[in-house]
Amino acid sequence: MIDDYFDKTLSAFRIYSTPAHRMTAPLRILSTFLAIAFCTAHTAFAFTVAEMKGMEAKVKALVSKNTPSVVALVGTKVPGSGSGTIVTEDGLILTAGHVTYGNETMTVVFPDGKQAKCKVLGADYNRDVGLAKIIEPGKYPVAQMGDSDKLDQTTIVIALGHPGGFDIRRPPPARIGRISQKNAGGFLVSDCTLIGGDSGGPLFDLEGKVVGIHSSISESLSYNRDAPVNAAKVSWDKMLEGKTWGRPPVRPGQRVTGPAVLGAVFDPAGGSALLKEVQPRSPLAAAGVKAGDVILKLGGEDMPTPKAVADKLKKCKAGEKLAVAYRRGADERKTEVILVSEAEMLKRMEPLPTPKKP
């Protein structure tokens, strides 16, 4: 009976991979997670398979509709990146206060890789909400803001954002969870899985409206805080005027990359600094390093883990030349790389191709 139900649950959350479903691709990697989450929830809420299929359709629709409005924000003065949501057609971006802190302008990266510049406006650091505005005039994709006061504990929510920073190979992944606490120090708490880089991204209700802004990302995957969107509404006019108040943040949960990057994606399960992917036109690619290689030393220092590499890069500057020792198969090799800034690496990325109309 349990196995039969689990099979039906997996079927209910199967996300198809045809070109017409391109914008829902982030959900494919989480289909099993979705199934497990709802299978667990079934004991408390008695969802039927039909209800879960309806839920799947809602989630797919809201992700498809809102993904174009979810942008990455990269600091031009203070290194690091976070996320944000465009909430007006003229380019107003809602994000977390700690994402914009210390910057006057930031680079906006859209899910297709296109870029723009934004001006940082005001922020309420007490509630960790902030605004920025895309400088170039235009009509931009938007997400609607909802009412966070209407949320209850156990309300199902969907998180979008750019975990680990902008990644040209995929749109913002969707994570599903539930509200576990309200008004926890003025914040919402959900069990949506978030990591650094998601900060400032949107939390949606099942009506597809923004109800929270990712704020403090915990080491525990089941305890992440979001600023309620109504907190931003209360401070809206002051933030539009460029005013800031409250205690400046310590940039909680934001991915801090340091001033230099290699252009690498490491395998977190590799047990070493194993390269899962080397980005085209990156410093590593220019040096001949490939996916599947293992970084052994960087600048003469041992690199036993991806974290060791990240810690090393935080101490380096763009333009700096570093010796690299790496292993390919059974061979150990040496080369040199010239580091670049994250902003420069973004310029080298090619936008995703525009999907062909059916």
Image (cartoon, grey):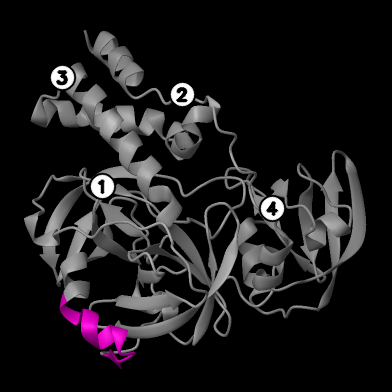
Which of marks 4 and 3 precedes in the sequence?
Answer: 3
The three-letter amino acid code for the residue at tag 2 is Tyr
Secondary structure, mark 2, is: loop
The residue singled out by tag 4 in the image is 273
Q: Residue at x 47, y 61 (%)?
A: 71
Viewer-nearest residue: 182 or 333 = 182
Secondary structure, mark 4, is: loop
Q: Residue at x 8, y 61 (%)?
A: 149
Question: What segment carries the magenta color?
Answer: 234-245
Counting from the top left corner in percent of width and height, residue 292 is at 76, 41
Number of callouts: 4
Mark toward the viewer: 3 or 4: 3
The residue singled out by tag 1 in the image is 208
Please identify the quadrant where the N terminus is shown: top left
Counting from the top left corner in percent of width and height, residue 258 is at 61, 75
Which of marks 3 and 2 precedes in the sequence?
Answer: 2
The three-letter amino acid code for the residue at tag 4 is Ala
Please identify the quadrant where the C terminus is shown: top right
Viewer-nearest residue: 290 or 137 = 137
The three-letter amino acid code for the residue at tag 3 is Thr
The residue singled out by tag 2 in the image is 16
Alpha carbon separation for disc pair 2 and 3: 21 Å
Secondary structure, mark 3, is: loop
Which of marks 3 and 1 precedes in the sequence?
Answer: 3
Alpha carbon separation for disc pair 2 and 4: 33 Å
